[in-house]
Image (cartoon, helix red, strand yellow):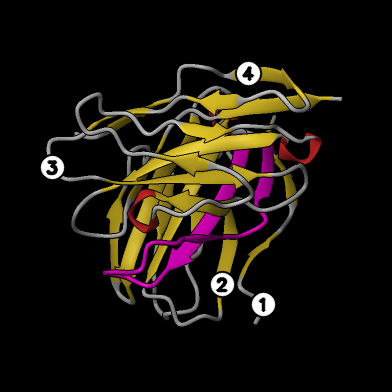
């Protein structure tokens, strides 16, 4: 069975500092990994997906199959990045997502 | 497009009562799902559907029923509410197969006393 782990429930950084949100997974097949974000009073929305290898709002994430990780990084955090971030895994077949526990990021001025 | 809509936004139930959380989408998505969000536990899948007439259980299905009579609607029924079902419930939808993004509704905050 697949599993997604986000070891940090809370993460606090200062504006302009680098930020890294950790995500580890276990899955026997070839996974597809995603980061979803939930800003205050907004819906959960897709931030980025590993397959597109894009940078969204300055965030990037690289899938490391050797370490089974998909950490989310941003070199200079902004106050508007404060939100709840969820890492999610999709099985090779089907649409079902498995989410991690979530990390609440706070960027202080 | 309204996207994914959920009603009600808030609900308070007494233990043992039943109710239905409504979810609808107007994007012609085949795949729909229900999650519950609890602090420190992330989003956990309750039930999902890959098309009209087809439903299946997720991680935490006990105490919940679903049906999918149309592509648009995917209601979640609580049969006999318990305090452990106090949570925020999210409905999501997507195209099946190769599409990756799930679109989420605004959520229903349920309190069972």
Mark 2 Cα-neighbour bin, 10 Å: few <14, some 14–19, many ≥20: many
Q: Is residue B109 magenta?
A: yes
Say whether marks 1 and 2 touch (CB < 8 Å).
Answer: yes
User: Circle 2 marks a residue in which chain?
Assistant: B
| x and y, in percent, of residue B17 in the image | 61, 43
User: Circle 1 marks a residue in which chain?
Assistant: B
Q: Is residue A10 magenta?
A: no
| x and y, in percent, of residue A63 in the image | 32, 38
Mark 1 to mark 2: distance in Å? 9 Å
Mark 1 Cα-neighbour bin, 10 Å: few <14, some 14–19, many ≥20: few
Q: Nearer the viewer, mark 3 or mark 1?
A: 3
Say whether marks 3 and 4 touch (CB < 8 Å).
Answer: no
Q: Secondary structure at mark 3?
A: loop
| x and y, in percent, of residue B113 in the image | 70, 29
User: Circle 4 marks a residue in which chain?
Assistant: A
Say whether marks 2 and 4 touch (CB < 8 Å).
Answer: no
Mark 2 to mark 3: distance in Å? 32 Å
Mark 3 Cα-neighbour bin, 10 Å: few <14, some 14–19, many ≥20: few
Residue occupied by mark 4 = A10
Q: Which mark is residue B24?
A: 2
Mark 3 to mark 1: distance in Å? 36 Å
- Specify whether disc 2 shares its chain with disc 3: no
Mark 4 to mark 1: distance in Å? 33 Å
Residue occupied by mark 3 = A29
Where on the picture, by quarter, is residue B86? top right
Q: Secondary structure at mark 4?
A: strand
| The residue stretch that appears in magenta | B87-111
Q: Residue at x 37, y 37 (%)?
A: B60
Residue occupied by mark 1 = B2
């Amino acid at each position: 069975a697949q599993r997604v782990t986000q070891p940090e429930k809370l993460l606090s950084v200062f504006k302009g500092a680098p930020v890294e949100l950790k995500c580890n997974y276990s899955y026997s097949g070839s996974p597809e990994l995603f980061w979803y974000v939930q800003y205050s009073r907004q819906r959960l929305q897709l931030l980025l997906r590993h397959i597109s290898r894009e940078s969204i709002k300055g965030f990037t994430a690289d899938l490391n199959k050797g370490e089974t990780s998909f950490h989310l990084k941003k070199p200079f955090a902004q106050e508007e990045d404060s939100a709840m971030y969820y890492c999610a895994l999709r099985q090779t077949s089907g649409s079902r997502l498995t989410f991690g526990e979530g990390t609440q990021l706070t960027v202080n001025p | 497009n309204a996207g994914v809509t959920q009603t009600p936004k808030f609900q308070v139930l007494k233990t043992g009562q039943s109710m239905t959380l409504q979810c609808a989408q107007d994007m012609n998505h085949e795949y729909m799902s229900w999650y519950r969000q609890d602090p420190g536990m992330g989003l956990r899948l309750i039930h999902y559907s890959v098309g009209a007439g087809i439903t299946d259980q997720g991680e935490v299905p006990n105490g919940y029923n679903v049906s999918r009579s149309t592509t648009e609607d995917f209601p979640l029924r609580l049969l006999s509410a318990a305090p452990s079902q106090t949570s925020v419930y999210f409905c999501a939808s997507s195209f099946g197969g190769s599409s990756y993004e799930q679109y989420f509704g605004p959520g229903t905050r349920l309190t069972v006393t």
